[in-house]
Every structure is written in structure tokens, then in C-alpha cells.
Image (cartoon, helix red, strand yellow):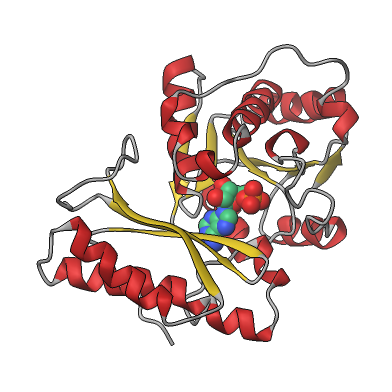
Amino acid sequence: MQIVQTVAALRAAVADARARGERIGFVPTMGALHEGHLSLIDLARAQCACVVLSIFVNPLQFAPTDDLAKYPRTEAADIALAASRGATIAFVPSVDVMYPGPRVVSVIPDAIADRWEGAIRPGHFAGVLTVVSKLFNLVQPDVAVFGQKDLQQATLLRALVRDLDFPVTVQIAPIVREDDGLAMSSRNRYLGVDDRRAALALSRALSAVSGRFLAGVRDATELCATGDAQLRLESAVRCDYLSIVDPVMLAPVDTASVGDYVMLAARVGGTRLLDNHRLGEPFPVLR
Ligand code: AMP
């Protein structure tokens, strides 16, 4: 695997791959890689001989009160893991490489970004869409892979490519979970033993909602009450939102249908966790 830190080196490495006739897959990350990230590399690798992994903790998507400074950074381990799964180029730029001068142009999403995560983290998605637009222009991939774990982000990235005509195919990979159901996240490492156990309330809530839906319940209020009840069983868990939403605009629905999502965010101790599940699909069996 080639490790590149500058725009020129990245462009040269990608040009070499193109000259060899390789398709280019792209997996953007903020590092602290876990099996969820690696599953995205696997999906890209299955279709593309060249897989570019980027590791960049993007300051633009963190508010001043967010956890930018303490975001986990495990670059050496990340590079070894990515190489072991077949990534061929690691792009690891500094903040100065990505944002060399004053920045006057951003990609600002429409109102869909103002709800859920956008309501709690103003400006977050403008930061995400701006950096991903830059990365798309730098890498110029054929395929870019993102995770369903960050459902609103994935939905907005699909919209970015559709609305601004980026010549890339976006693929959304399923959520990778720990054996006990907790969705893998770089932030899980912040959880102490008690909070780690309490965090299982999130996947239990999704599992319960999924089960009620599969049993025929369609009333969204009733489905949400089922999820909320699970979350309330753990006093360390503070729910930010739990809602049944349509898959395109992520707007709350009154009556749930197959293909809608149950999505939630909750704080466990000082750690904010996200999770979701597509209704109609059985929730994975939890151990
Ligand atoms: P991050 O490094 O947190 O910005 O995540 C990079 C990419 O990995 C995003 O597309 C995430 O949605 C995806 N991702 C994070 N966690 C998981 C997971 N548990 N399963 C699948 N994809 C994930």
C-alpha cells in the first residue's frame, strides 16, 4: 500500500492506477479504524483493483464544543489494518494540505440537513459535504463507499452526488455490529465498562421496534414508544431522538412502511452514539 500525504502524490498514485486500467474505489474515514470501516474497504476492493482509503479528521465538521481535540488517532494501526484488507493507497493529509488558504466556498445542504444530527450539530453536514466534495475532486473515484451507520450522512452524500452531478457511484454498506449488537463506532472506545453495557439499550431498542414492525404494527407512535421504553430501562442512556423516517428525506412518518428507517441518537455517559435499522429486515440476533 502506498501512503501519500500531499495532493500531488495522491494524484500521481491514482493516475498510475488509472494508467494500469484499474477502477478506483474510495473509502473516506476519520481513522480509528474498526471492522465497520474495513467492511467498506472489502466492498470497494471486490469491485476495484485500486482502493483509496483517506484518513482525515475534518475540523470543518466539528463544532467548537465537539470532541475534535480528543478524537482518537491511531494512524499506524489504521494503515496496517487497511493494507491487510487490500487498500492500495492511503491518503493521510494534514489540515494544511486540505485547507491551505482562506476558505470562501462551502457546500451547504438543504433543509433535510437541519433535522436530527443537523439540529444538534449546526454546520456539521456542510463540513461533511464540503470535505467529501474536495476528496471526490482529488481522488476522482468510480465508486465511493459509505456506511449506513451514519444514515443521515449517507442520505446527504447520495443527494450531493445526485444534485451536483459528481461522476461517482455511491454505495452504502450495512452496519457492522459487535457480537452483542452494539454498532461499531470509533467513539465506542470512550465507553467505560458500565456505559458499554448500558449502550446495548440502543440495539435492543432497534431490535424491539423491528420485531413489532415485523409482527404487523405500523403506527409510528406505537413503534417509537416500544423503542423509548427499551432506552428508558437504562438510566445512563439519554435519548436525543428516536423516530421512524422515510428513506429519502428522513422525515418522520405517521404510518411505517417497509424500507422506512428507525433511527436514534443517544448519549451514554459523555459519549454520543447513533444507530438505525431498516424496517422490514430482521434485526440481527443478539448474543
Ligand atoms: P468515520 O471514520 O466515523 O467518519 O466513518 C467512516 C465511514 O465508515 C462512514 O461512511 C461511516 O458511516 C462508516 N462506518 C462507521 N461505522 C460503521 C459500522 N459500524 N458499520 C459500517 N460502516 C461504518
Q: Is residue 154 something that shows in the picture?
A: yes
Up-down relation of residue 145 to residue 77 (above or below): above
| Residue at x 62%, y 38% (from the top left corner) | 26
Vertical placement of 64 versus 99: above or below? below
Q: Is residue 196 left or right of residue 92?
A: left
Where's residue 94, x and y in %? 88, 36
Q: Quadrant location of residue 247?
A: top left
Residue 127: % across, % down: 65, 31
Q: Is residue 82 left or right of residue 96?
A: left
In this picture, residue 253 sits left or right of residue 178: left
Expressed as whole percent of the image width and height from the top left, the position of residue 271 reads 65, 65
Location of residue 31 with respect to 64 vertically, above or below: below
Residue at x 17%, y 48% (from the top left corner) = 254
Residue 45 in view, yes or no = no
Q: Residue at the location (79% across, 59% down)?
A: 72
**Horizontal and vertical percent position of residue 230:** 37, 77
| Residue drawn 60% across the image and 35% down it | 122
Q: Which residue extends farthest left?
A: 216
Residue nearer the viewer, 230 or 162? 230
Q: Looking at this view, is 235 or 184 the one in front?
A: 235
Quarter-wise, where is residue 217 in the image? bottom left
Q: Quadrant of the C terminus?
A: bottom left
